[in-house]
Image (cartoon, rainbow, N blue to C red):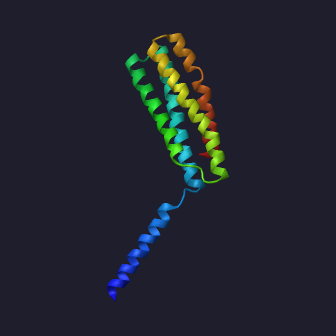
Amino acid sequence: MRKWVIFAALVGIWAWLVVVFSLPPDFHDYRKTAVQAAEAAHDAVRTADLTVGAYLAHKAYGPYLGTVLDDCVSSTSSALGQLAELPPTDARTTALRDELAPLLDEAANRLADVHRAAGADDPGQLRTAQAPLAPLAERLTDFLDRHG
């Protein structure tokens, strides 16, 4: 009899864990993931902007610029993937995704442009590619201020 009670308790605990861990994410979980993705993209865009500025002012070397830009591109790609892995569950999470996804997309594209320009070794082209980074970082800051 005692074995059956223990067995029933274990089955009950297992069933509870299945229910808890299989529930779809709620708004708080989604917002937390969205904010983490926005922070990663924001940090990458700001870092790229500052590093390109230092490089153009002859305060950083080309290999350092390349390494930093590689990390920035990778970080932003990971942020996009992080948001894409968690599907929205309701109208609020859909609205949050619809607000953030274009910013993450733009960050990935702008950072890729900067990376290509750095590889071309043309300061004018690099300066042109850098120009949209600061305004984009500000838009990401606005998102974080509202949702963070």
User: The C terminus is located in which quarter?
Assistant: top right
Q: Position of residue 54 (x, y in %)?
A: 47, 19
Task: Let me know if residue 60 appears in the view.
Answer: yes
Q: How many marks?
A: 0
- 130 is higher (above) or lower (below) than 105: above
Viewer-side residue, 54 vs 131:
131
What residue lies at 40% left-to-right and 80% top-to-bottom?
8
Viewer-side residue, 148 vs 93:
93
Q: Position of residue 99 (x, y in %)?
A: 64, 40
Q: In the shown orientation, is residue 8 left or right of residue 144?
A: left
Viewer-side residue, 48 vs 57:
48
- 129 is higher (above) or lower (below) than 101: above
User: The N terminus is located in which quarter?
Assistant: bottom left
Q: In the shown orientation, is residue 19 left or right of residue 31?
A: left
Task: Let me know if residue 58 appears in the view.
Answer: no
What residue lies at 53% left-to-right and 39% top-to-bottom?
39
Viewer-side residue, 55 vs 102:
102
Q: Position of residue 7 (x, y in %)?
A: 36, 79
Q: Residue furthest left?
A: 3
Q: In the shown orientation, is residue 62 left or right of residue 103?
A: left
Q: Position of residue 115 (x, y in %)?
A: 47, 21
The image quarter containing residue 65 is top left
